[in-house]
Image: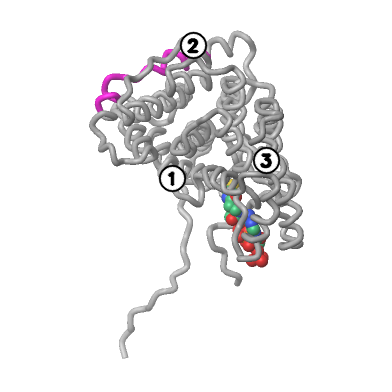
Amino acid sequence: MAKVTGLEGVVAAETDIGLVDGERGHLIYRGYWAKDLAVNYSFEEAAHLLWYGSLPDGRELAALQTRLRESRKLPEQVRLLLDALPKTLPMMGVLQAVVASLATEEEAVWPPKVSQAERLTALLIAIIAYRHRSLQGLAPIDPDPELDHAANYLYMLTGERPNPDHAKALTAYLILGMEHGMNASTFSGRVTLSTQSDLFAAVSAAIGTMKGPLHGGAPSEVIAMLEEIGTKDRAEAWMRNVLENGGRLMGFGHRIYKTKDPRAEALRIVTERLTGGDPSFELALHVEETAIRLLAEYKPGRRLYTNVEFFAAAVMMAIKLPTELFTPTFTAARTVGWTAHMLEQAGINRIFRPQSTYTGRMPVFGD
Ligand SMILES: CC(C)(COP(=O)(O)OP(=O)(O)OC[C@H]1O[C@@H](n2cnc3c(N)ncnc32)[C@H](O)[C@@H]1OP(=O)(O)O)[C@@H](O)C(=O)NCCC(=O)NCCS
């Protein structure tokens, strides 16, 4: 029998939350195209869709906005813990520890509640902003009740009310990052929850899984590549050199998508609106076009196209988000999808318990 490694092709659960179709380039959240949600809806509306199964009406949206607003202020014990953690602990470790600490006796209940998912989602951006500023010796910024989720994140990081176009671009990125089927972190969160552990422990486990470089994404490597290329006229020679030496072009190729990554397509539209005509965006577009041509030449038949990281990098550059916040920001987005999956898992729960094939030595029986 052929060896299956990494559970590739194995169906681990049924879900109503998201469909990833890599052959067709489809990403669907509960019946809606993720790319349409990203371009035309707010973070709050998309989160409501994933948690509750439908887009909110006006009243539901206002109520969700109020609940998120009320949860965004950091509780005192969270501040104390953040201040006590070593400065050398990277942000993903900080998030894992602080999220796990929220599972007090009162909160560590079964089944998990959607109100916990909402509170955690609202808190995460405040935790990231607080920690980021404190490492720079800057005072924390309280959330602004008039701003929505994405705008508040930028506001709490910088202390300045963000340019609405920047908040819109970040919103699109956050929506596209919310959900992506049975990826490693979602699976790990569902496995933890399936033991009837609490939502905070399950999100903490998912964060630990997201932290690894094979999952958490590296738009910073795309930025490094664009910076090294520098100008359009250098792009082709630079990329030929990488490919001739067996290297990989960052931001291209995907394990699942064998056609255009729909998230890259949506982010291209958003970035174009944000920075259209800007030389760095023109360079990104030129690099993309050249890379796809060269990948078809050097790797025929491998179906290598632009992935989400390429345009995520363009958005991050445009809104000036520091590179060390890329994976934490992705985490803040994916928390919505993780928690939707955990609530779904709780509703149909059976503990995950796969088997392994023993390949070790056997004891010697008798003579
Ligand atoms: C994302 C990625 C790991 C998916 O890999 P995968 O589906 O396992 O594909 P493989 O690693 O098996 O690659 C298949 C072939 O395409 C080539 N290939 C894949 N992505 C490539 C890239 N970005 N640049 C150059 N060649 C690439 C591989 O070298 C391999 O060639 P070979 O058949 O001659 O050995 C891979 O495309 C990659 O490394 N991309 C660059 C990093 C990146 O953008 N990461 C962010 C992902 S969201």
Cα distance between the residues tagged 1 and 2: 31 Å
Task: Report the residue at 34% width, 30% height from top.
Answer: 108
- Given residues 234 and 130, the one toward you in this image is 234
Helix, strand, or loop for circle 2? helix
Cα distance between the residues tagged 3 and 2: 41 Å
Instruction: Point out the tag, 3 or 1, that comes first from the N-terminus.
Output: 1
Drawn side of residue 154 relative to residue 45, left or right = left
User: Amino acid under label 2?
Assistant: Thr
Quickly name the residue at label 3.
283
Across and down, in percent, residue 320 comes to: 52, 30
For the residues bearing labels 3 and 1, Cβ distance under 8 angstroms: no
Task: Report the residue at 56% width, 30% height from top.
Answer: 174
Closer to the camera: disc 3 or disc 2?
Answer: 3
Task: Report the residue at 36% width, 25% height from top.
Answer: 130
Instruction: Point out the tag, 3 or 2, that comes first from the N-terminus.
Output: 2
Cα distance between the residues tagged 3 and 1: 30 Å
Quickly name the residue at label 1.
211
The span shown in magenta is: 64-80
Quickly name the residue at label 2.
66
User: Amino acid under label 3?
Assistant: Leu
Instruction: Point out the tag, 1 or 2, that comes first from the N-terminus.
Output: 2
Drawn side of residue 345 relative to residue 85, left or right = right
